[in-house]
Structure formats: structure tokens, C-alpha cells
Image (tube, rainbow, N blue to C red):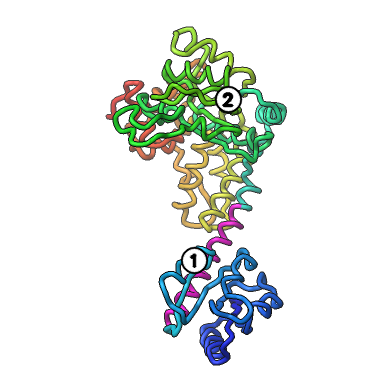
Amino acid sequence: MHEILIVEDEVIIRDSLSRLLRRNDFSVTAVGSVDEAIREGLQGFDLIVADLRLPGAEGTSLIPQAKSVPVLIMTSYSSVQSAVDAMKQGAADYIAKPYNHDDMVLTIQRILKRRDLEQQNCVMKREIDSRYPIKNLMGESNSILQVKDRIQRVAQTQTSVLILGETGTGKELTARAIHAQSTRANKPLISINCASIPENLIESELFGHEKGAFTGALQSSKGLIAAADSGTLFLDEIGELSPEAQAQLLRVLQEGEIRRVGSNKMQYVDIRLIAATHRNLMEMVKQKLFREDLYYRLNVMEITLPPLRERVADILPLAEQILHTLSTRLQRANYRFDKGAIKLLQEYRWPGNVRELENIIERSIILSNDQLITAQDLGLQQAASTPTSAIVSAELSLDEYFVEFVKEHQQHLNETELSARLGISRKNLWERRMKLGIPRP
């Protein structure tokens, strides 16, 4: 039962409102002034309903003292200005006297429902953070323990970090872990996926632009690098940067300077750079596709994330933690895997790595008829039954493996299912089809 505190100096209104709320199954405490309300202990209530005009102090003076407890302000001095003033001070809502009984009850129910949802979200976030923490990648295999050790060693420095790994291995999670344990943890972390920004806009997005610098530049923009000043800049898929953007990024690393598009002035920034890619940057350097001097500036400390297929011992613990996290988020408790599902999870090759594992488990929870996840719920039988040698070779590059996997499965999977298996979006699947020349059947 929700606890409501009424703060109203007029006895008739106070008693009438108390009776109304009790009839609607609320527990009510009623007082006549702000001082009396404070003596009751504001934090012990779910909602405070306070008159605006009270002896000694206005009802709005309770708002900062109530902190997380919402305050509904009511007044007979109804005006647009008083409503605006109350809301500006942080009131949850505003109702004018004389109020309609149904309107009062509905307003209170709406405020309490919103508060309950916010509290549930906070509890859920704490649960997710404890089970799926940003500061630690999940897993206890030797390869992931080495990654964790390297994160701890480099986090407290200002050194640039290059994170390598296949799609879905947790490159952004690693970058967030480094930032969270660094001296810049209370400063901004700006994450940018270089592959998602059109090439003709990448310089403007990163370095900013002046008003009128190009068609469509209707106002100035400081750029994402400037937004990361004093914090951490994470550039995902850095191998997609144009040569021009690479040259400007090198200047940022060498001199701490950026110049907006269309400007002659230099601006100084203080950033810690973390970059990531699934591509072979050294090979790109040899092919003159990536600047050698920028590569060596980035590659001061390298962290290589192992693919999930090389962390077999981690698959089941990861799956169980993800299952708990997602079932909590979806408000479906006590889900577990049966023996067939466990066997399939451990045998599957996981081309989309941890991201694919998360997608598969979330889909399984939604499709499952009960709290036991079966092999059929996972929907991986076809992929798992295909001989490994027919799908993947240790000598294949990531792009070659992608081509083999798509050609192998596109006859019996639609684009949504195929992208889910790969742990990528449908848009990303289409883009890689175009890039690698794989037409849809």
C-alpha cells in the first residue's frame, strides 16, 4: 500500500482528501504545515500532496527536501504562472482547487506508477550492473584473464590503446572498462563508430565545422573530439577513416590540436584515445590504406580480444549470466538451459561472438513456452549440424569467413535470422553484402 503525506492547513479540505484517498486504498498521514511535514520524515512516503499556500512556508519548499519523493502541488490560486513556477521547482504535477475527485485520484495514480517504474528500473540497473558489469569482461579463461590484466595495467595511464578483435567480441565494452578505471572516469566518454558516419561527413562530425562551411551547415558545431575534451575518445572501426581524417587525427595525437572545417583557428583539446578495429591495420599500412605514423601512434598498447570459439570454457558461464540478466530485464525470472541446449551452446562456432550469444538468448526467452530453454528454442541446430570444416577454417580471414557463412546459410535463413546469427544488424549485413559482393539469393 502506498504511503501518502497530505500537507494542507484547511481542516475541512485535509479531512475530505484523507477520506478520498483512504477509500482508494492509500495509507494517509495528514498535517497542517511544512514544519509538521518535516517532523513526519519526508523520505518515508511515496508521495507528498501539498497546498501551495501554507502558514510559515509554501508547499513548494518541500520539493528540495523531499529529494526522490514526488510532490504534487495543489492550490486555489490557479494560474498558468503558478503552475509553471511549481513545475520549474521540480513538482511532479499540479492540480487546482476545487479539484475533481476522479482527477485527483487519477493524477496520484499516474505519479505513483511513474515512480514505481523508475524504482524498478534502478533496481534492475543495479542487478544488471552486478551481473554484467562494465568494469569486467565476463569469463575466467586464460585468454580473457590476460585481457583483464592488461586493462588494469593500462587504465591508470594516459596511453593510447588499440583494441583488436572480431565483431561482437566486446571492443566497446573493453573501452568502457578502461575509461571506468582511469583517472578520467568522471569525465565524458565519447564513442564513435567510424563506419556508421558517411565519408563526406566524418571530418565535420569528428572535428566540427563553422556555420556556412559547406551546404547544410546552418550553424556551427564543435565536433565529437571537442566534446571528449578532458575525457576519453573511443573510435570504433578506425580502419574506416579517410586519409584526410587520419591526417587530422594524427595532429590531435601529436599536438593536441583540432581545426574545425571552415575555420583557420586551432583549438587545443586534452583527450585519451582508445581505438578499435576488426581489420588488419598493419596490412592496410602495407597497402597504403592507413597511415603508418598514425598506426604507431595508436598502437602504443594493444589489446586483442579472443573470439568466443576460442573461449569454450567461458561459453556456459557467459550464457547463464546473460540469461539471468535478460530474463530479469524482460521480467521473466528463473529461466535455465536444459542439457540439449547446453551441449549446443558449447558446440556452436559463434561467428558473431558474445553479441550473437546475447541475441540468441534474448530470442530464446521470448519464444520459450516455459522457463526451460531447449536446443530447439536456441534455433542453432542447422548451424551446429553443419561440419565445421565446411564453414570455417583457421586460415580464413574474417571477411572470407563472413562470405563462407552467408553463402552456407542464406538459402534457409532470412535476412533477420542471418543477421541475428552473425550478431550484427540487418543494415550492417546489407552493407557487408555490398562491400564483399554477396548478392541475396
Q: From this viewpoint, is residue 100 visible?
A: yes
Residue 397: say if magenta: no
Residues marked 1 and 2 touching at CB (< 8 Å): no
Q: Is residue 429 above or below residue 246?
A: below
Circle 1 crowding by C-alpha within 10 Å: few under 14, some 14–19, many from 20? some
* In the foreground, 420 or 35: 35
Image coordinates for residue 140, horizontal then vertical, percent: 69, 35
The residue sitting at 49% across, 47% down in the picture is 362
Q: Residue at horizontal 60%, vertical 17%?
A: 299
The C terminus - image quarter = top left
Residue 342 figure quarter? top right
In space, the residues marked 1 and 2 are separated at their CA atoms by 46 Å
Q: Quadrant of the N terminus?
A: bottom right
In the picture as drawn, the residue positioned furthest to the bottom comes out as 12
The residue at 47%/73% (across/down) is: 94
Dot 2: few (<14), some (14–19), or many (≥20) neighbours within 10 Å?
many
Q: Work out whether residue 160 or residue 310 is closer to the camera in this orientation and state it.
A: 160
Q: Relative to residue 176, is residue 406 depicted above or below?
A: above
Left or right: where 144 falls relative to 111: right
Name the residue located 44 percent from the left edge and 85 percent from the top edge: 98
Please state the extent of the stretch shown in magenta in the rendering.
102-125
The quadrant in which residue 4 appears is bottom right
Disc 1 marks a residue whose amino acid type is Met
Which residue carries the number 1 mark? 87
Residue denoted by label 2: 163
Residue 429 at what x, y percent from top left?
Answer: 37, 31
